[in-house]
Image (cartoon, rainbow, N blue to C red):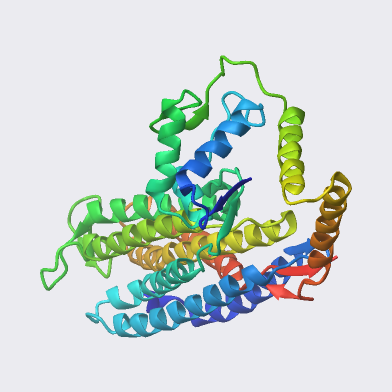
Amino acid sequence: MGSVVPLGLVALLVPVAGLLAVLISLNRVVRVPVGTDLSALRVTTTRLFWARLAGLVAGLAASGLVLSWDGLGRGPMLAAPVLSIGLLLGTLAGELAAPRPHGPIRGASLEIRRARDYLPRFSAWLAGALSLVAAVLLSVTSVTASADDMGRAGRALAMSSPDGTVRSVTGPWPGWFYAWPMLAVLATAFLLSALVVHRVVQRGRPGLDVAARAVDDAQRAHSARVVTAAYGLCVALPLIGVALVAAEALFRHSDFAGWVAPAASGLLGVALFAAGSATWYLAELLSRPTIRPS
Amino acid sequence: MIEVDVTSPSPPYEQIRAQFAKLIKCGVLAVGTRLPPVRQLAADLGLATGTVARAYKELEQAGYVTGKRGGGTRVLPQPEPRMARAELIRSQARAYLAEVIRLGGSAEEAIATLSEVVALSDTAAAAHPADPDLHV
């Protein structure tokens, strides 16, 4: 399914995401006073980076394997979510590997850390909207799907002309055949994201001064941003494919009813929305905050 | 700020309980203030969750806080007159001075040592300059 995504679109969106990432990074500078001791945070930074990289490599390997699954389009549809899950697992491993407070005297502030303190508001909202759109779209396509010529349930769209004389069956159609693996992967990714964010918030923070705490907060916020971006890509990329495939199938039936062509155009809008979201999440993933002494 | 000395003969849960009790008594933690979640405080101090949970339970039994499922642990109004923060600092200073005198020192020496410690902590902060560019 994902193979129908035009390569030209991808070639355009990746440089846009790169440019956006540079702009975001330039705006995410944490200034700390000269003399701030950041040695305690350096180990965490290194471990988080390498664990995320390892997760990305493992995700790439797994998505390579998934890509060739079944030959009916489910492999390409699940490749991006599998890659995202690899990144989420890497982030979780990094968070778990962060050093625990040690030493004979340990301090803690009386603050209360909450997930909403670190989650990027817009990206989280966008991920919620994408999930809702994906769930609604897959529910509708599942309900309207029929079996294909090989008898595989939920893989084709069958429509009859208004007078009932002509019946056409076209596929692929993102019915239950495609919906269940996608929804299962999305549910897994969502639960994993929630687990990683919980760990980001609850990870121990040794007694730090105000400036070092600001850096630690930036580190946690970046982790939460990576989680949101990974989940967002997990939903947005397959949604592009699902919307395009459904739109293509509807356009083939545009003579059967008046609502078909507008519905297909609406699906193209969904694909565009998902592509824009994927670009934003890719930019979020590539951006990194910088700490500068002031 | 809560500090725990794991080498102290006093168990960590007792240190946590005593510090919270003092903060509540002198009004640093006002009525209704929410205490950090048990898991978070345990993670920040590098202690077992049960250690912090025991401290909270004892605070609850002593009537300092109330714990509700989903609502966190919150500070309760205290019947006894509130100990002034300034009075608490004064009592800590008195304890420090008594310790210096017990070791054969004088009040002047106690003040000089305190100034020296403050100057040293300032120097230590300046000796660890932040990285020019640290990516997180």
* Left or right of A86, for residue A69: left
Residue B87 in percent (x, y) is at 74, 28
Residue B34 in percent (x, y) is at 54, 33
- Name the quadrant of the C terminus of chain A: bottom right
Between B104 and A251, the one lying in front of the other is: B104
Between A233 and B126, the one lying in front of the other is: B126
Between B23 and A54, the one lying in front of the other is: B23
Numbered label tally? 0
* Left or right of B28, for residue B57: left
The answer to which image quadrant residue A65 occupies is bottom left
The vertical placement of A205 against A91, above or below, is: above
Residue A63 in percent (x, y) is at 36, 80
- Name the quadrant of the N terminus of chain A: bottom left
The vertical placement of B42 against B86, above or below, is: below
Residue at image position (37%, 47%) is: B50
Residue at image position (53%, 46%) is: A114
The vertical placement of A138 against B38, above or below, is: below
Residue at image position (77%, 72%) is: B128
Q: Is residue A114 visible?
A: yes
Q: Is residue B71 visible?
A: no
